[in-house]
Image: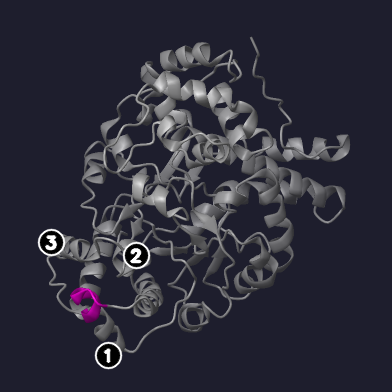
């Protein structure tokens, strides 16, 4: 039976001299608490604290990194147990799903998914059996037995993973009931919401009018006109801040943040309410609302996160059959300099405003993002995200942004995942890559080793703390640990 062993120097640079320095830097950060401020684990996971159902539902079905690779080699989504919107038949046997995954384990060679999955199996689940067609059933049974242990309930894993603070991402129309349960159980300062208004600011999205009605019901503010809509959004932001939120999250197609005149914004909103806003009007309104969200962040202190540049649901048939987040979201070229100019001209030097920019377009690292973060006090660069949260992607990020933006105009590492068990693996990989990059600076006599160690600790822990400062609107809520 194939054994799975993790090399202690995995992802550290080759070469004895530089690797020795990288080891010492990595050792200074490996035990630091995790700050998980851009996450997508559902709050209900922690509120209900139920055991994870089975290995397939834990590690395969909800992870679009995993399913997209299998789909690319001809495995249908239905065979992986991904539910259909219409409730149609899909594979219901988790063991069969797991066998298909293990039979295709070789597909993940060289990918970050393999790094994370191996870390989860060995370091988290404490199992040394490698996935493969001949080990699928044995590995399934070992994982199943581990998941039955009380130590593998979600709340227990918060401690096991040394997670100091984790955010969920919640629609603006969430009543935050799960977060209320967490507060009642004493976890409200450790698991916090993040305000995601996209489904309301994109007026052509399916179900928009229904969500506007939900916004009215939750806020108690009449959303029949544009002024009421804005007031209702402010009310929901305040509710999120009171629940401990530190940030907002915005996933627009572009970074355009161009304000409209008040009259034009009211006109488009009225058209959207009637159901006859054009695509161009919807795009203009989305850009206007991104600017308005910046204004609100300036006022209430919620940190603004923007991650544009992904054409979502590229395969229309898959989207219609299985819904969103099924692995068919594809990056596009993204322009930031002109798109963000109106926002940054207005708020970029305001001490009450904080903007964190993420991208999946590497071509803008040195040309646009690093120069923007290197001059506007409000701007920080988010960690490599999505297709770029990989060993080489993280190295390229450091190489391309540091000389212009430095280390301290970045957010440090924050993970972006729905796969709860992969969180420690992702932080571990980032700490190893940063250790390797900093070790190179030491070897090249560009940085003293004590400075490199201090910088590594900052990147892993202190910078996320500073980047995601508490909201002024929620300042009287219970403080987080640390």
Tag 1 residue: 263
Name which of mark 3 and mark 2 comes first in the sequence: 3
The residue singled out by tag 3 in the image is: 217
- Residue 124, can we see it? no
Q: Which residues are magenta?
A: 270-276
SS class, disc 1 = helix
Q: Magenta includes 55?
A: no
- The image shows residue 410 at horizontal and vertical percentages of 59, 60
Which residue is nearer to you in this view: 351 or 137? 137
Above or below for 381 versus 374: above
Taking depth in this image into account, of 434 and 282 the one nearest to the observer is 282
Give the residue pinned by disc 2.
472
Query: From mark 3 to mark 1, how far is it between C-alphas?
Result: 26 Å
At horizontal 64% and vertical 9% (from top left) the residue drawn is 1
**Residue at 44% from the left image edge and 82% from the top image edge:** 258
Locate residue 377: give its quadrant: bottom right
């Amino acid at each position: 039976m194939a054994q799975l062993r993790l090399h202690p120097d995995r992802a550290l640079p080759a070469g004895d001299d530089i690797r020795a320095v990288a080891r010492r830097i990595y050792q200074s950060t490996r035990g630091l608490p995790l700050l998980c401020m851009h996450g997508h684990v559902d709050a209900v996971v922690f509120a209900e604290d139920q055991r994870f159902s089975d290995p397939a539902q834990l590690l395969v079905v909800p992870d679009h990194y995993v399913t997209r690779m299998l789909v690319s080699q001809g495995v249908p989504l239905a065979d992986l147990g991904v539910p259909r919107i219409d409730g149609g038949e899909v594979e219901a046997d988790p063991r069969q799903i797991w066998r298909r995954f293990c039979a295709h384990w070789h597909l993940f060679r060289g990918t970050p998914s393999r790094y994370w999955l191996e870390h989860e199996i060995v370091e988290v689940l404490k199992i040394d059996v490698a996935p493969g067609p001949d080990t699928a059933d044995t590995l399934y049974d070992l994982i199943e037995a581990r998941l039955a242990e009380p130590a593998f309930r979600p709340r227990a894993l918060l401690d096991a993973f040394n997670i100091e603070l984790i955010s969920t991402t919640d629609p603006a129309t969430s009543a935050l009931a799960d977060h209320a349960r967490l507060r009642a159980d004493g976890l409200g300062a450790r698991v916090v919401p993040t305000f995601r208004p996209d489904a309301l600011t994109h007026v052509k999205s399916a179900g928009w009018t229904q969500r506007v009605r939900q916004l009215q019901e939750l806020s108690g503010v009449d959303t029949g006109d544009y002024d009421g809509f804005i007031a209702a959004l402010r009310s929901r932001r305040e509710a999120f801040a009171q629940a401990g939120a530190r940030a907002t999250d915005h996933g627009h197609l572009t970074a355009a943040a161009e304000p409209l005149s008040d009259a034009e914004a009211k006109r488009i909103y009225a058209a959207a309410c009637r159901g006859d806003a054009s695509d161009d009007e919807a795009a203009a309104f989305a850009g206007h609302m991104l600017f308005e969200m910046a204004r609100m962040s300036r006022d209430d202190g919620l940190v603004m996160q923007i991650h544009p540049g992904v054409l979502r649901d590229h395969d229309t048939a898959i989207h219609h059959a299985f819904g969103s987040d099924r692995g068919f979201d594809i990056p596009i070229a993204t322009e930031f300099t002109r798109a963000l100019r109106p926002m940054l001209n207005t708020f970029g030097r305001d001490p009450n405003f904080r903007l964190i920019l993420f991208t999946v377009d590497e071509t803008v690292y040195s040309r646009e993002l690093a120069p923007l973060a290197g001059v506007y006090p409000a701007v920080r660069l988010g960690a490599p995200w999505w297709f770029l949260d990989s060993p080489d992607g993280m190295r390229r990020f450091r190489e391309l942004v540091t000389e212009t933006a430095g280390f301290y105009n970045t957010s440090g590492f924050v993970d972006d995942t729905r796969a709860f068990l992969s969180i420690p693996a992702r932080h571990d990989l980032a700490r190893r890559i940063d250790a390797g990059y900093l070790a190179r600076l030491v070897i090249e006599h560009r940085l003293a080793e004590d400075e490199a160690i201090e910088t590594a600790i900052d990147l892993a822990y202190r910078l996320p703390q500073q980047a995601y400062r508490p909201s002024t609107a929620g300042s009287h809520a219970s403080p987080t640990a640390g």
